[in-house]
Image: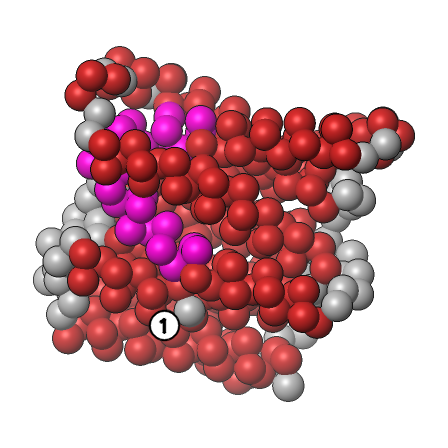
Amino acid sequence: MTARAAPPWLVWAALVVVYVVWGSTYLAIRVVVEDLPAMLSGGIRFFLAGAIMFAVVAVRVPSSVLRSVDARQLGWAAFCGCALATGGNGLVMVAEQSIASGLAALIVAMVPVWVVLFRRASGERVSRVTLAGVAFGFGGVALLLLPGGGGDSEPLGFFLVLCASLSWATGSFTSSRVELPANPFLSTALQMMCGGLLGVVIGVAFGEAGDVHADAFDLDAVLAWGYLVVFGSLLAFTAYVWLLQNAPISRVATYAYVNPVIAIALGALILSEDVTLTILAGATIIVGSVAAIIRQETA
């Protein structure tokens, strides 16, 4: 599906929101999972944000807009929402129980690399320069997987974040090629509700509900969770989904080499996370490869 034209200033405003807010959400997630159940709190976060947005949309748009959503559009919204909110963000929340927030952001930055592989698999021609960027990107991840390369982070955290980046790339790639509800805010609401609901189901299935003890909640974790709901989901996720439907995915993907820089800096400054020479080298390789891919694809 070809992205619909949108005012350039609005595209850049949405990009700035995604750059800054999502760069800070990795820090907030790390604070949340110190005290709250990861997948369950993430699922509730997205379902609540989606329900709030759906209620606003239902009040502000004609009822015909809601009735215009057919089963196919709803199905794709559910698929993309689950890939983005559950597989993408949900796995990041689980992973950040055992991996530094800056490293999580860095590995999620591999999303454009996965998208290139999806494009190649779908039959699109991909330049050699782009494929070289893909190889370098995975080389950067491999560097972080060396003993001690990720500081005190555990291998399981790396694996889960890699799966999260793959899932996020799947949702991003798919949403730009399928028919979603025409109203971007309704589309976002449905995606967040579906993804959030699946996250809640998975969290309950894995026994996270038994870990909920309201009297033991730390105020910092609650405030961080509220930040994720309002800014991470209602604001930034909405901006991202809108961008996927209104701007070239190559431009949307530029967030991937801005977010890690913000996340690594915040993690080091506020949480005193290790920033080793290996991490800096891996970051340089990954961010550089993503930048090269995006530059090549937009040339």
Instruction: Identify the main secondary structure in magenta.
Output: helix
Extent of the magenta region: 21-44
Whether residue 185 is visible: yes
Q: In this view, does 205 lie to the left or right of 264?
A: right
Q: In which quarter of the image is the C terminus?
A: bottom right
Query: In the rendering, at what x and y percent does residue 202 appear?
Result: 42, 24
The part of the image, by quadrant, that contains residue 281 is: bottom left
Which residue is label 1 attached to? Answer: 286
Q: How many labels does the image show?
A: 1
Magenta span has 32?
Answer: yes
Magenta span has 158?
Answer: no
Q: Nearer the viewer, residue 118 or 83?
A: 83
Q: Nearer the viewer, residue 250 or 62?
A: 62
Is the image coloured rainbow, by chain, by secondary structure, or in one colour?
A: secondary structure
Q: Is 202 placed above or below 226 here? A: above
Whether residue 79 is visible: no
